[in-house]
Image (spheres, grey):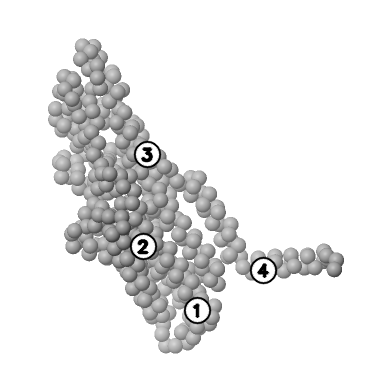
Amino acid sequence: MRISKLRIFAVMAKEFTQLRRDRVTYAMILAIPIMQLLLFGYAINMDPRHLPAAVLSHDKSTIANTVITAIEQTSYVDVKYLPVSEAELDKLMRLGKVMLTITIPPDFTQRVLKNDNAQLLVEADASDPQSAGNALAAISALPETVLVHELKGPVGKNNSAKPFEVVVHKKFNPENISSYNIVPGLLGVVLTMTLVMMTALAVTRETERGTMESLLATPAMPLEIMIGKLTPYIIVGIVQASVILILAKILFAVPMTKNLTGWFALSVGATMFIIGNLAIGYFISTMARNQLQAMQMSIFVLLPSIFLSGFAFPFYGLPNWARFLGNLLPITHFLRIVRGSLLKGQVLSDMGTSLFFLALIVIILLTATVVRSRTTLD
């Protein structure tokens, strides 16, 4: 049988017609690689700079101020806070407002001038081991050059060695165990991946099979249908979270908070996060025409959740626009809650900001989902 060009063109015309009918699927096929290109090309940075820091200086001399200025000039550190006590300094670190704290003792200048083992204390938040590594290396190299102009003449001759030493303390994860950072973060990623996709596929499947129309034919309103459908998945999400936390302790020895208020805050945050993911999945189902589209849209949500939340790459390594987008994602705030609870011993009052923004995002998602359900299903 001879190959017919006419039949080939007929099949091609049929495929182009199908493309016009299923624009969402093919748009997603183009959008996903473009998103990956933009994220990896512009957003991902393994060398975080301008990390927020706090300086507690008991020495107001010119030499001490020169050292602080030099630390900022490395571009790895931005001094955002000047606390007046060690308690305030520790609180800033525990709340996650700073990644580094620098303490200058009162006799710093005197010891520098006498070449008497002057020390500078730098504490780093090691709950994310990747974030502060290069910053600590840059600060540790400063003693060799930072006071060259200040220690000239007779004073300089007495300082043949390094004028001071940088003492580094790593808090919350002093051994730089990567699983302490990754495993709690996996809790957020797993819940996002499974709950968003599971909900989107389940509801879209019912729409394809026509059972959703049967539900809408009953006296139940769309809001009631949504609540009834999502409630079982909330229980599934809670079970998932519990299993992951138990395995994290047994298999990886991840530190667990011993404070009941910390567990309460984590439970509240996890529940809100689960509801938010289910709302995203349900919202996707109102736009998807079939399960393939629902799965593709779910991946479109999952990629930013991994790359812009601080799970896979340091959050402070992202450019400002990427951090802004990351703060719009529920997982970003949930990761701060779960890591703060498990690694830093945060309690409910410490997580107020993260819980507030997570709750706000969840309320917006639920409202948009209800509105969209009424528009598309009524």
Using a 10 Å C-alpha cutoff, classify the residue at mark 2 as few (fewer than 14 neighbours), some (14 to 19) or many (20 or more).
many
Label 2: element kind? helix
Q: Are marks 3 and 2 in contact (CB under 8 Å)?
A: no
Q: Which residue is mark 4?
A: 18
**How many C-alpha atoms fall within 10 Å of the one at disc 1: few (<14), some, or many (≥20)?**
some
Residue underneath mark 3: 49
- Residue at the extreme top of the image, as rendered: 154
Q: Are marks 2 and 4 in contact (CB under 8 Å)?
A: no
- Residue beneath the point at 16% across and 41% down: 86
As displayed, is residue 53 above or below residue 201?
A: above
Which residue does the image show at 42% across and 55% down from the upper left? 306
Q: CA distance from mark 2 to mark 1?
A: 27 Å
Q: Quadrant of residue 147?
A: top left
Q: Is residue 25 above or below residue 164?
A: below
Amino acid type of the residue tagged 3 in the rendering: Arg
* Image depth: mark 2 or mark 1 in front: 1
Tag 2 residue: 361
Is residue 202 visible from the viewing direction of this image? Answer: yes
How many angstroms separate mark 3 from mark 1 (CA)? Answer: 48 Å
